[in-house]
Image (tube, rainbow, N blue to C red):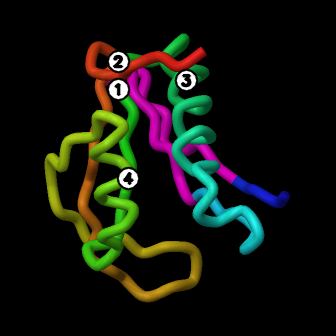
Amino acid sequence: MFWEASLYDFDESKNSIFIGYTFYGTNSRGKGINPQIKKMMLNYVFQFVDKVYFHIGKENFRSQIALERLGGQKIAEEEVAYFGEPTRTNFLYEVAKENHFKVD
């Protein structure tokens, strides 16, 4: 199994951070790995911050639904330019520590 994830834009004044892209090998898709990895990452970062943000593409309905299942709330729409890519419309999602269900 291959996976990659990132954290970025820590904001000390807001006590928040972003979780970025997560990628998985094609043999890992459809097996419930993505929600488990996201839960693990949220459990970890909520030891240090109170809010976690995600940028999710406006057309990426699967990721929007998946994040809402983890307690994410759509709070804004933003234009985001990823590394060397054109600007795209993204939704900004927030998961607040008090709305997160810790997974053992």
Cα gap from disc 1 to disc 3, whole angstroms = 9 Å
First of labels 1, 3 by sequence position = 3
Q: Is 7 colored magenta in this rendering?
A: yes
Q: Earlier in the sequence, mark 4 or mark 2?
A: 4
Residue indicated by mark 2? 97
Residue for badge 3: 45
Q: Is residue 13 visible?
A: no
SS state under label 2: helix
Q: Residue furthest bottom?
A: 86
| Distance in Å between CA atoms under marks 2 and 1 | 6 Å
Q: Which residue is mark 4?
A: 66
Q: Nearer the viewer, residue 80 or 71?
A: 71
Cβ atoms under marks 2 and 1 closer than 8 Å: yes
Comparing 69 with 11, the one in front is: 69
In the picture as drawn, the residue positioned furthest to the front comes out as 31
Label 3 Cα crowd, 10 Å radius (few <14 / some 14-19 / many 20+): some
Q: Residue at x 55, y 23 (%)?
A: 45
Q: Earlier in the sequence, mark 1 or mark 4?
A: 1
Identify the amino acid type marked 2.
Lys
Residue under pointer 1: 51
Residues in magenta, as a range: 5-21
Please give the name of the residue rendered at 51% of the width and 28% of the height, measured from the top-left corner: 42
